Amino acid sequence: MIRPATPDDLAEVTRIARAAYTVYVDELGPNLPPMVQDFSPDIAAGHLWVCEGGYICAKPMGKDWLIENVAVDPAYAGQGIGRRLMLAAEGAGRDLGFHRAVLYTNAAMTANLMLYPRLGYTETHRVTEHNLHRVYFAKPL
């Protein structure tokens, strides 16, 4: 069951973020944004949803619906949790009147570069932001 996060979920969301991104530490460093993010403001604003083993953060970004972060605990990998979270977040954006979802991933996260097109996203551009090489994608809602 995917539901809006509450303050009681903060510790678990933080744990999942650290567990999910640990595989990238050797290549990208220990301070990846989701690993050090304070999720409290997103929880308070209603921008974070959780389910057993995962979470997703999505919010308005100008005229677009930004899927800012999705993470699944490695112990739950391969169960379709990430895909269900993405569909839920896209539905929330559509329900709020957004016509396009956007997201970005690090260029070094090559699995994501293959995954997002399978979910209907098209690469739009690549940039370096905050010393990270990001690849942006978009999908009509």
Image: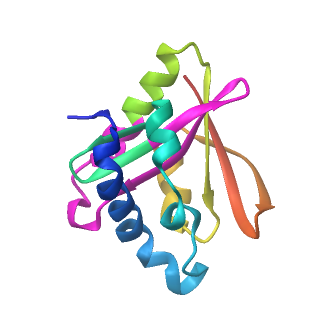
For the question of whether residue 95 can be seen, the reply is yes
Color encoding of the figure = rainbow
* Horizontal side of residue 19 vs 61, given as left or right: left
Residue 117 placed where, x, y %? 53, 46
Residue 87 placed where, x, y %? 39, 32
Please give the name of the residue rendered at 60% of the width and 19% of the height, measured from the top-left corner.
98
* Horizontal side of residue 68 vs 75, given as left or right: right
Image vertical order of residue 50 relative to residue 19, above or below:
above
Q: Nearer the viewer, residue 81 or 4?
A: 4
Residue 33 placed where, x, y %? 58, 63
Task: Determine which quarter of the picture holds residue 31.
Answer: bottom right
Which image quarter holds the C terminus? top right
Q: Nearer the viewer, residue 46 or 95?
A: 46
Please give the name of the residue rendered at 68% of the width and 49% of the height, measured from the top-left corner.
136
Please give the name of the residue rendered at 47% of the width and 29% of the height, measured from the top-left corner.
90
Residue 132 placed where, x, y %? 71, 67
* Horizontal side of residue 111 vs 8, given as left or right: right
- What span is colored magenta in the figure? 57-86
For the question of whether residue 47 can be seen, the reply is no
Image vertical order of residue 84 relative to residue 79, above or below:
above
Residue 64 within the magenta-colored segment of the rendering: yes
Please give the name of the residue rendered at 53% of the width and 15% of the height, measured from the top-left corner.
96
Image vertical order of residue 120 relative to residue 33, above or below:
above
* Horizontal side of residue 23 vs 84, given as left or right: right
Residue 23 within the magenta-colored segment of the rendering: no
Task: Determine which quarter of the picture holds residue 75.
Answer: bottom left
